[in-house]
Amino acid sequence: MDVTTFAVNQFIPHPMMLFAAGTYSENESPHLALVSWVNFYWDDGLGVVLCMDGDKTVKRNFEREGVMVLNALSRDMFDEAEALGRASGREKDKVIARFALEPAKHVHAPQLCESPLRYEISLRKNLSFEGGNLYLCAIDGVSTVDASIQNDGVSYDIVAANPLLASQKSYCCLGAQNVLGAWC
C-alpha cells in the first residue's frame, strides 16, 4: 500500500484523548504508558478498541494478564504525561512514581487516583499486524473523580474533567468557552 508523506505526517488529523494505560509487571510493579488510539465498538455491549504499536512493557503485560486500566489524563497532569511519554528504562520508573496509584476495583491493574475517567478493560480479541496490535476489549468497570461528574450523578462532564488531548504535534484541552451547545 502506498502511503504519501502527507498522510504519514498528518496521521492524527483530529484530537484524541490521552490515556495512561496501567498494568502490573510480573513482579507486581505498576507500569504506565501513554496511549491515544482508543475508541469504542458494540458487540453485545459497549467495548473499547485499543491500538498499540511497537514493543512496550505495558503491551506485553496486557497480553500476558489480559487486563489494564485506561486512565484519562487531565490538564493538571500535563507535566507528568509529557515526562511519561519521553521516559524509558529506569527514568520511566521515576516518572511512574510521580503518579498516585491504587489498585483498580474490577481488574488486576493500577489506576491513577486523580484520573478524571478510568476504564477497566479486559482483552477479548488481539489482532496482530506488522508492527502493531488492535485489541477488542470488554469494559469491566468505569470510574471518575468527583469533579468530573455532573450534578445528576450519572453523566460524565467532559469540560469539568478537562482532558488532555493530542492532535498531530500539539497538546490541547477543552474549556467551558469551547462548549457550543447540547448534542442531539
Image: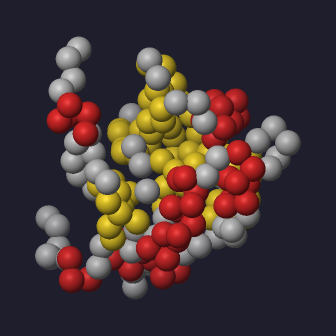
Residue at left 17%, top 67%?
Answer: 183
Q: Is residue 138 left or right of residue 67?
A: left
- Colouring of the image: secondary structure
Count the numbered circles shown. Answer: 0
* Quarter of the figure that contains the N terminus: top left
Q: Position of residue 134 (x, y in %)?
A: 44, 29
Q: Position of residue 170 (x, y in %)?
A: 32, 60
Q: Pick whichever, 75 or 114, lies toward us.
A: 75
Q: Pick whichever, 15 or 116, lies toward us.
A: 15
Residue at left 68%, top 53%?
Answer: 92
Q: Is residue 163 above or below residue 9?
A: below
Q: Is residue 106 left or right of residue 136?
A: right
Residue at left 59%, top 73%?
Answer: 114
Is any part of residue 118 visible from this angle?
no
Q: Pick whichever, 101 or 55, lies toward us.
A: 55
Q: Is residue 83 above or below residue 127?
A: below
Q: Is residue 145 left or right of residue 168?
A: right
> Quick one: which residue is furthest to the right in this view?
27
